[in-house]
């Protein structure tokens, strides 16, 4: 079933919408949550909450691409749970957060919704300016929290090369954000 | 802003990019091509403590994996630092549609003037050309482009940052018939041509490998 058909099911308030979403994107959502939480049970809980959230938001929303839509929900929910647990030191997230800290220019601490929107738009521009594979690797690491080993296997690269590519891109991002006037 | 907040904001980027980066369930496209270094050309150029080494390889097609028409070759060059530590690898690869390009640069390298000198083929059994690459730093930005089959344009830009090591380049292509690959290296700032060569690529069915031959070389930096 394609995404449009599944979204139609949500709009029709057919419960098979959730079943179809789970069939098509359950593993995807679970992967995203597991990478953050490193716990199967918690990941499953997030997965189920994702379906609920999708049910609650479609309609009025009508996402054209369901995969990233539910993926984003899973990511947010999983990270909410991660922050609530705040004791977990396992997995990739602590490393990912440390690495992302390198991208933050300046010492500013004022942050609001407007800044968030501006940052999001700038991130989109920055990411679109990257070579496709670099962008994908960057997002595998910092959006999907995949390990370097996993990324290296997926892209037939050495781990060290992946690491260096990410370092270079983080540096580039930092420079870009500074140039854009973000004092984060 | 904390890194956690930044991590959250990163979560809201364009869905299209999120989807494109998603882990794939299908085995990556390169797996079915088995790379075999059938011979290696190692040249040591010692200049101010910098050691340059190169490794070229062409894929050996495993019978049954794919037809020659669906295979492609890669010339890959490695950059190393003074301690012979591999710093990065460049591969430029094309998918079956021949219209997309990907490039991976593991590290930013400073631009060096470089020349390409075709070496003699090592008798008829040699299946690929050797390139001698010597480099010297000049700090300019270089772009490289080549054409193949008149349908595919290779364009690679090599970014520059202060890593003190020589750099080389890679070209690859996807073709079904004997093909001339024209590789042009231009200085991005001055727009002047730095190097231009024609590499004839031919698939040898008996050897199950590709034969590469430089047929024309026009270089500003010939030694």
Image (tube, coloured by chain):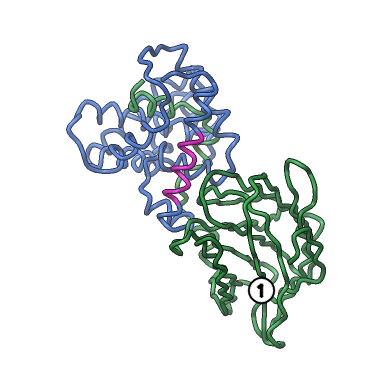
Chain colours: A blue, B green
Horizontal and vertical percent position of residue A44: 27, 38
Give B87 or A166, whichever is nearer the viewer.
B87
Q: Residue at x 48, y 47 (%)?
A: A165
Give A96 or A38, whichever is nearer the viewer.
A96
Give residue A24's quadrant in the image.
top left
Q: Quadrant of the C terminus of chain A?
A: top left
Horizontal and vertical percent position of residue A93: 30, 38
The residue under label 1 is B130
Report if residue A164 lies within the magenta region. Answer: yes
Above/below status of A32 relative to B64? above
Write down the region rendered in magenta: A162-172
Horizontal and vertical percent position of residue B113: 68, 55
Q: Main secondary structure of the magenta part?
A: helix
Give residue A161's quadrant in the image.
bottom left
The residue sitting at the front extreme is: B48
Give B42 or B6, whichever is nearer the viewer.
B42
Q: Residue at x 59, y 34 (%)?
A: A128
Q: Residue at x 79, y 52 (%)?
A: B193
Other residues around mark 1 within 10 Å, as few (<14) / some (14–19) / many (≥20): many
- Chain containing the residue with disc 1: B
Give residue A25's quadrant in the image.
top left
Q: Secondary structure at mark 1?
A: loop
Above/below status of B52 relative to B41? above
């Amino acid at each position: 079933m394609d995404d449009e058909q599944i979204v139609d099911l949500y709009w029709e308030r057919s419960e098979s919408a959730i079943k179809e979403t789970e069939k098509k994107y359950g593993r995807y959502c679970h992967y995203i949550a597991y990478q953050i939480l490193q716990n199967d049970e918690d990941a499953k809980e997030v997965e189920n909450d994702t379906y609920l959230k999708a049910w609650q938001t479609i309609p009025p929303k009508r996402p054209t691409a369901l995969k990233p839509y539910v993926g984003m929900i899973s990511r947010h929910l999983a990270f909410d749970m991660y922050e609530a647990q705040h004791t977990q030191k396992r997995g990739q997230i602590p490393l990912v957060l440390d690495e992302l800290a390198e991208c933050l220019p300046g010492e500013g601490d004022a942050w609001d919704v407007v800044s968030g929107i501006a940052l999001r738009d700038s991130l989109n521009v920055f990411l679109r300016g990257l070579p496709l594979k670099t962008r994908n690797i960057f997002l595998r690491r910092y959006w999907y929290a995949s390990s370097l080993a996993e990324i290296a296997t997926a892209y037939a690269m050495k781990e060290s090369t992946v690491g260096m590519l990410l370092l270079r891109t983080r540096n580039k991002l930092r420079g870009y954000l500074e140039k854009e006037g973000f004092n984060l | 802003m904390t890194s956690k907040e930044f991590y959250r904001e990163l979560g809201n980027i364009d869905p299209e990019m999120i989807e494109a980066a998603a882990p794939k369930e299908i085995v990556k496209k390169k797996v079915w091509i088995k790379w075999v270094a059938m011979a290696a050309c190692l040249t040591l150029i010692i200049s101010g403590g910098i050691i340059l080494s190169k490794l070229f390889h062409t894929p050996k097609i495993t019978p049954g994996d794919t037809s020659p028409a669906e295979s492609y070759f890669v010339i890959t060059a490695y950059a190393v630092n003074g301690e012979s530590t591999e710093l990065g690898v460049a591969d430029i690869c094309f998918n079956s549609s021949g219209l997309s390009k990907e490039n991976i640069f593991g590290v930013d390298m400073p631009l060096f003037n470089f020349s390409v000198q075709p070496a003699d083929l090592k008798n008829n059994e040699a299946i690929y050309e050797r390139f001698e690459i010597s480099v010297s730093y000049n700090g300019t930005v270089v772009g490289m482009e080549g054409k193949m089959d008149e349908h595919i344009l290779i364009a690679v830009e090599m970014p520059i940052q202060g890593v003190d090591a020589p750099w080389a380049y890679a070209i690859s292509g996807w073709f079904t018939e004997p093909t001339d690959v024209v590789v042009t290296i231009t200085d991005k700032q001055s727009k002047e041509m730095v190097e231009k060569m024609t590499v004839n690529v031919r698939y040898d069915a008996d050897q199950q490998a590709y034969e590469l031959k430089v047929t024309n070389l026009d270089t500003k930096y010939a030694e």
